[in-house]
Image (cartoon, helix red, strand yellow):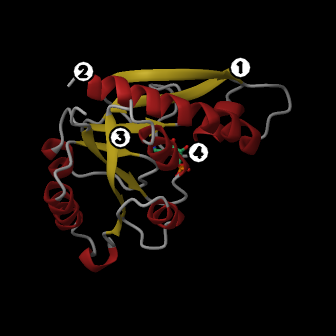
Amino acid sequence: MTQRTKVAVLISGRGSNMEALVRAAQDPACPFEVVLVLSNKPEAGGLVTAAEAGIEALAVDQRPFGKDREAHERAIDAALRARGVEVVALAGYMRILTPFLVEAWAGRMLNIHPSLLPKYPGLDTHGRALAAGEVEAGCTVHLVTAGVDEGPVLGQARVPILPGDTEHMLSDRVLEQEHQLYAATLAEFVRGL
Ligand code: GAR
């Protein structure tokens, strides 16, 4: 079998997008394999899920590094390099990156965001979309560049906003699309490397 692209998934919490990527990679025809799941928070539930799926799950706790975010990222980068990681997928990694990690992985780091970027970057995307009276929402997979939730768009999926939607209902509807979009977009991206 030809070599599959080694992917690390960075998470901070639940890790449902990470699970979707792990599931996609269980198909032998998938062009990537998930070799590492890494969290900045040791208590992230996704670490347990990853370990149960037989994937190396590693916490690089941000706390001992205090305000030195670059030192924390250097530790992350070392862990990625040590495992021969080729592509990094941010999946609910809720810490703003410094230029160090962005530049170290330029063109090789993807992120998923639960809005139709460039609309609603940052936090509380669903609440803001509802408050603005939008009739459509969605999610975006993009390459990571210096700005938060910026960078070239690789794929988007759209969902309707329905009358009576709560944030919870909308985020569930978008999340279902996120899981499909991320796996498909990452596969297409690594095929093009
Ligand atoms: C997902 O909705 C993801 O798009 C979002 O956090 C959630 C993580 O869920 N990411 C961002 O908002 C990044 N700006 P998950 O841990 O179940 O994948």
User: Do residues under tags 2 and 1 come within 8 Å of each other at their CB atoms?
Assistant: no
Q: Earlier in the sequence, mark 4 or mark 1?
A: 4
| Mark 3 Cα shell of 10 Å, populated few (<14), some (14-19), many (≥20) | few
> Percent x, y for residue 16?
55, 49
| Mark 2 Cα shell of 10 Å, populated few (<14), some (14-19), many (≥20) | few
Q: Amino acid at mark 4?
A: Asp
Task: Give SS at disc 2.
Answer: loop
Which residue corresponds to mark 4?
Answer: 124
Q: Nearer the viewer, residue 191 or 11?
A: 191
Residue at the front extreme, as displayed: 1
Q: Which mark is residue 148?
A: 3
Q: Earlier in the sequence, mark 3 or mark 4?
A: 4
Instruction: Calculate the distance from the C-alpha at mark 3 to the C-alpha at mark 4.
Output: 14 Å
Q: Nearer the viewer, residue 89 or 26?
A: 26
Q: Earlier in the sequence, mark 3 or mark 2?
A: 3
Task: Give SS at disc 4.
Answer: loop
Residue at (71% x, 20% y) in the render: 135
Q: Earlier in the sequence, mark 4 or mark 2?
A: 4
Residue at the bottom extreme, as displayed: 64
Say which quadrant the N terminus sits in: top left
Q: Amino acid at mark 2?
A: Gly
Which residue corresponds to mark 1?
Answer: 135
Q: Is mark 3 within 8 Å of ligand 1?
A: yes
Q: Which mark is residue 192?
A: 2
Task: Give SS at disc 3.
Answer: loop
Say which quadrant the C terminus sits in: top left
